[in-house]
Image (spheres, coloured by chain):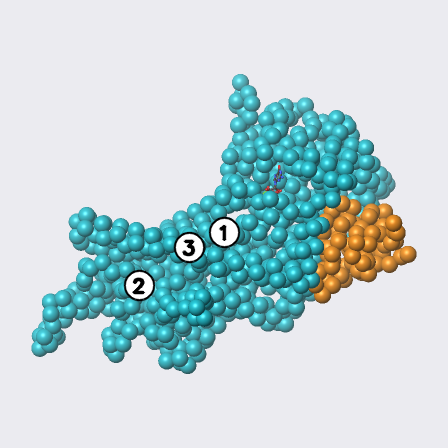
């Protein structure tokens, strides 16, 4: 099932399918946000923003507005 | 044998242990912390190598890649692109760490493209067993075309092997480990054709971002028929990154093994508690409360000890130096002035200790994560929390720590409001004033009234920072893209050596910095207070003696009167009297006025200044602490005490809000690159301080 990163539930894992190259900063790409990489929502902050993610083994937090721009395919295990 | 000095640069992602390694190699004590972005400036040290060779080691801010995203990252690229830079390295050491090797290697492959001799350091080897990680070093060396040093800068293992590699740097391959120009061969061939003497990758770096080096600028390079639009450039950068990751992912699949059972660690357990929706906040505020409680509880005994020691030192000097003006200057100006700062070493050290623990444990990033949404409401970023907390020690490093806030508007607001937080330099002023005007009582049996006042002042500082941020957020019409990424490092047991050194270094800097200003200012003030331009000053004795003929004054009282008349007619007295009308409505006399003016150099000189002025202005030799002198000070006209509840509160609030720190203004100028912001800051903060102090005094008196 396809969705965006901001809609992931805690502990849910997904594969990055695509993202908006115009709005996603290069820094995030360099930290591991790219097609084919695994992303997991570790924890959402109070008020649901920002999001604490495990992206291809890198633990990082981004704001929701940025997470909206990343399309993922949820994997079920 | 030629005794050459090699130049070595430490490059790597944030938080990989570059500074820890730097300290190992050079024996220096630069600040280390488990938070991305601790180092923000170039630091140089020297290191001796085998065969009598020497190297200068350069520590740099962490960077995720050679594409500059922020100011401190820019520093690294500018260095590596500019062969003429005096620090341009003979050898680059790329520092990575075992757990984040995949991401760390991205930068490594970029550095290799610059064709500098490069050594790969894999740090934190001590974590491998715990995390179930194993590495195939020979395989990595072949694929990455480099030599690898597997080290632990905490446990000091592998350092000698690394030194051997540095000495033999000429044997390192300078070949890139992958061919990145494949992403658009036509384009890169064109570049190569036009600039045959330049490295392709360097050209690409200049084109794809706004860094200049030498005569090659982006504009010149982009002036070609085959040039690409910014959008196309970003697409290429994306492609380049993907290509590099493919290479790294494939390599690590073979060369790095992780035992998953062991890997599930402390992190997830701690995170679920510390970043919990409600629990997270409770813990954070409990920690803050604990910090401030301890700062005051633990420090009271050593502070009393220091206070008494300085008082007896004063007496000792007074008795043993030949009496006279020099004696007065030393025993009554300089010693109490320095004592006024030294006494706060316990409090400041405890504060530094806690901040250091927060940084070293990895908790700071969790606070950033927790607070981001809340802080954004005020125009700040979650990352502003770090400067605001460390601003309670000193605003200067705090303002430098804003460099990793990506959004310029959020960063600017943070820089502008950080000086409102109660820095260590305010503590001496607060403490002495509180002791004078707030009774040493307990309410509800446990809350100390004086401690409570101090806590209120801290809270006030934070509140003012938040309120000003909200106002600035509304007023500043800056459009900048909101963008926020923060790495969440692993939790680490704080390393006692790092924490200890950190506390020691910072405390030392504070005390010596303040000490220097205080001593020199005391001397200047003392001279200005001991000499005067007019006849009134020269003939003080006669004038007062004639004036007092028909009053029956004791010898003692007469001498006091002469001394204070002299002071009023000294240079400092004349200046003070001139500014008195401005500050009188706030409840201060001209002597406090001088204290305030002197404090614009740095707040902590207030106590020393007052000590100098009062000691010149009184005749008596008896040993009085500065606090007692202030308590005894009366208004010469009304005969009422100067330090009342109303004037004391007014003065406290003045110090809480006024921008009285040259060094802070200088750093704001440096960080914002214009005089506009420091001047606005100075006027706004000091104006606010004046108005608040005025209102409060008029209301309370
Ligand atoms: N376990 C372990 N921890 C280490 C080692 N080396 C450094 N650290 C810790 O890693 C954290 C980061 O170290 P720093 O030396 O500040 O890292 P840096 O690369 O200079 O970081 P920035 O200046 O932010 O780019 C600190 O908490 C260190 O104590 C090591 O060999 N083993
Ligand atoms: Mg560092």
Find out whether the residues at labels 2 and 3 contact each other: C-beta distance under 8 Å: no
Q: Mark 2 vs mark 1: which is more N-terminal?
A: 1
**Residue A1 image position (x, y, % from top left):** 91, 56
What residue is shown at x 39% (from left), y 60% (from top)?
A: B428
Drawn colour of chain B?
cyan
To which quarter of the image does residue B375 belong?
bottom right
Mark 2 lies on a secondary structure that is helix
Mark 1 lies on a secondary structure that is helix
Tell me, for residue B352, which label it has, or none: 1
Q: Judge from the rendering whether residue B283 lies leftward or rightward of residue B311; answer left or right.
A: right
Residue carrying label 3: B299
**Residue B242 image position (x, y, % from top left):** 82, 44
Drawn colour of chain A?
orange
Q: Quadrant of the C terminus of chain B?
A: bottom left
The subunit carrying tag 2 is: B
| Residue B80 in sight | no
């Amino acid at each position: 099932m396809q969705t965006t990163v901001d809609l992931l539930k805690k502990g849910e894992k997904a594969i990055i399918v695509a993202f908006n190259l115009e709005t996603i900063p290069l820094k995030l790409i360099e930290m591991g946000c790219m097609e084919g990489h695994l992303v997991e929502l570790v924890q959402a902050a109070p008020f649901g923003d920002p999001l604490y993610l495990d992206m291809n083994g890198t633990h990082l937090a981004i704001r929701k507005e940025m997470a909206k721009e990343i399309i993922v395919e949820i994997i079920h295990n | 044998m030629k005794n050459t000095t090699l130049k070595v640069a430490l490059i790597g992602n944030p938080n990989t242990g570059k500074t820890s390694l730097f300290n190992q190699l050079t024996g220096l004590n630069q600040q280390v912390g488990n938070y991305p972005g601790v180092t923000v400036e170039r630091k140089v040290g020297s290191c001796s190598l085998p065969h009598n060779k020497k190297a200068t080691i350069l520590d740099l801010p962490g960077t995720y890649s050679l594409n500059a995203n922020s100011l401190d990252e820019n520093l690294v690229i500018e260095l590596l692109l500019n062969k003429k830079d005096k620090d341009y390295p003979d050898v680059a050491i790329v520092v990575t760490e075992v757990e984040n090797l995949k991401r760390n290697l991205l930068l490594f492959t970029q550095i290799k493209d610059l064709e500098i001799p490069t050594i790969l350091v894999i740090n934190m080897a001590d974590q491998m067993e715990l995390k179930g990680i194993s590495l195939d070093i020979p395989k990595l060396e072949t694929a990455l075309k480099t030599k690898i040093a597997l080290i632990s800068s905490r446990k000091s293992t592998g350092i000698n092997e690394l030194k051997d590699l540095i000495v033999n740097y000429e044997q390192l391959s300078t070949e890139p480990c992958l061919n990145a120009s494949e992403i658009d061969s036509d384009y890169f061939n064109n570049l190569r054709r036009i600039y045959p003497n330049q490295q392709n990758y360097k050209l690409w770096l200049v084109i794809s971002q706004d860094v200049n080096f030498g005569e090659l600028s982006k504009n010149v390079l982009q002036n070609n028929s085959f040039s690409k639009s910014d959008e196309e450039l970003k697409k290429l950068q994306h492609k380049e990154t993907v290509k590099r990751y493919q290479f790294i992912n494939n390599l690590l699949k073979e060369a790095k093994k992780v035992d998953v059972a062991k890997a599930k660690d402390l992190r997830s357990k701690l995170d679920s508690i510390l970043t919990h929706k409600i629990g997270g906040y409770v813990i954070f505020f409990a920690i803050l409360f604990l910090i401030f409680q301890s700062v005051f509880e633990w420090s009271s005994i050593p502070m009393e000890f220091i206070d008494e020691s300085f008082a007896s030192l004063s007496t000792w000097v007074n008795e043993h130096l030949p009496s006279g003006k020099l004696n007065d200057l030393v025993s009554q100006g300089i010693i109490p002035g320095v004592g006024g700062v030294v006494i706060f070493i316990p409090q400041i050290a405890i504060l530094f200790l806690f901040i250091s623990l927060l940084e070293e444990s990895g908790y700071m990033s969790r606070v950033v994560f927790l607070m981001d949404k809340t802080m954004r409401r005020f125009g700040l970023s979650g990352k502003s929390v770090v400067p605001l907390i460390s601003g309670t020690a000193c605003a200067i490093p705090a303002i430098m720590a804003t460099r990793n806030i990506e959004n310029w508007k959020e960063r600017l607001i943070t820089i502008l409001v950080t000086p409102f937080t109660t820095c260590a330099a305010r503590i001496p002023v607060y403490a002495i004033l509180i002791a004078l005007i707030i009774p040493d009582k307990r309410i509800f049996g446990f809350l100390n009234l004086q401690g409570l006042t101090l806590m209120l002042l801290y809270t006030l500082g934070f509140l003012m920072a938040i309120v000003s941020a909200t106002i600035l957020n509304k007023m500043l019409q800056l459009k900048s893209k909101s963008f926020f990424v923060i790495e969440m490092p692993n939790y680490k047991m704080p390393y006692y050596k790092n924490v200890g050194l950190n506390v020691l270094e910072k405390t030392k800097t504070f005390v010596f910095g303040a000490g220097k200003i205080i001593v020199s200012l005391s001397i200047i003030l003392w001279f200005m207070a001991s000499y005067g331009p007019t006849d009134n000053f020269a003939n003080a004795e006669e004038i007062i003696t004639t004036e007092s003929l028909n009053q029956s004054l004791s010898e003692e009282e007469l001498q006091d009167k002469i001394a204070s008349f002299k002071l009023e007619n000294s240079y400092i007295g004349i200046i003070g009297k001139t500014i008195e009308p401005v500050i009188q409505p706030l409840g201060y006399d001209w002597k406090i006025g001088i204290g305030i003016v002197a404090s614009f150099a740095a707040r902590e000189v207030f106590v020393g200044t007052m000590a100098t002025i009062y000691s010149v202005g009184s005749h008596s030799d008896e040993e009085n602490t500065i606090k007692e002198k202030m308590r005894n000070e009366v208004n010469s006209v009304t005969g009422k005490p100067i330090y009342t509840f109303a004037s004391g509160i007014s003065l406290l609030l003045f110090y809480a809000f006024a921008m009285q720190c040259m060094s802070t203004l200088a750093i704001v100028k440096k960080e914002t690159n214009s005089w506009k912001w420091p001047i606005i800051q100075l006027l706004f903060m000091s104006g606010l301080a004046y108005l608040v102090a005025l209102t409060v005094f008029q209301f309370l008196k």
